[in-house]
Image (spheres, helix red, strand yellow):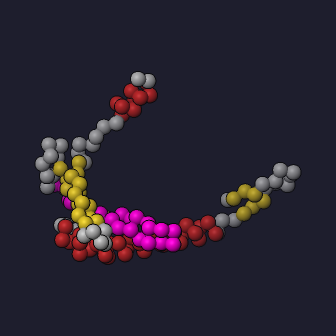
């Protein structure tokens, strides 16, 4: 084993203070809800931390299906199912706004010609 492999192996550690049990629920139509239950290193539920929920689904775009995953603010599975549509809509709206912002930023870049020479290049700033 090389020293780089040994160093990497020594640095990689499982964070035992941040363990979650992962459960997946689906209706086989709309999508899935991931429920992450905080657990202690011995596997017991850690009641001092909150459950975490993520929605998962696919959007159909002109380029094909686009998988998305988004957080759902809920205290239990029932609440996560009820908030799924709203959380998905908010996430998609944010994603579209971010794409529009990136497009505006790209379009507003100024193209400045480089110094005059036989090997002139366009410099983006």
Magenta stretch: dominant SS? strand
Indicate the position of residue 87 as horizontal and vertical percent values.
32, 72
Query: What quarter of the picture does the C terminus occupy?
Result: bottom right
Q: In the rendered image, which quarter is residue 113 located in?
A: bottom right
The residue lying at 25 percent from left, 48 percent from top is 18
- Residue range corresponding to the magenta coloring: 48-69
Q: In the rendered image, which quarter is residue 111 located in?
A: bottom right
Q: Which is more toward the observer, 49 or 76?
A: 76
Residue 36 visible somewhere in the drawing: yes
The residue lying at 22 percent from left, 57 percent from top is 23
Q: In the rendered image, which quarter is residue 15 located in?
A: top left
Residue 31 placement, left or right of 45? right
Q: Is residue 52 magenta?
A: yes
Q: Is residue 2 magenta?
A: no
Indicate the position of residue 78 as horizontal and vertical percent values.
18, 71
Instruction: Identify whether 98 is placed above or below 48.
Output: below
Instruction: Identify whether 26 is placed above or below 48.
Output: below
Instruction: Identify whether 48 is placed above or below 57.
Output: above
Query: What quarter of the picture does the N terminus occupy?
Result: top left
Q: Residue furthest right?
A: 118
The residue lying at 28 percent from left, 40 percent from top is 14
Residue 99 placement, left or right of 5? right
Residue 73 visible somewhere in the drawing: no
Indicate the position of residue 97 as horizontal and vertical percent values.
48, 72
Instruction: Identify whether 106 is placed above or below 47.
Output: below
Residue 121 placement, left or right of 46? right
Q: How many marks?
A: 0
């Amino acid at each position: 084993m090389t020293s780089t492999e040994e160093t990497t192996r020594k640095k990689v550690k499982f964070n035992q203070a941040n363990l979650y049990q992962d459960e997946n629920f689906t209706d086989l139509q709309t999508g899935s809800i991931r429920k992450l239950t905080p657990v202690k290193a011995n596997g017991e539920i850690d009641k001092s931390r909150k459950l975490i929920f993520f929605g998962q689904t696919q959007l159909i775009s002109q380029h094909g299906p686009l998988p998305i995953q988004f957080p759902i603010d809920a205290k239990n599975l029932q609440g996560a199912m009820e908030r799924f549509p709203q959380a998905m809509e908010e996430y998609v709206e944010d994603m579209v706004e971010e794409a529009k912002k990136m497009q505006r930023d790209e379009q507003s870049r100024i193209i400045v010609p480089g110094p005059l020479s036989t090997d002139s290049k366009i410099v983006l700033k």
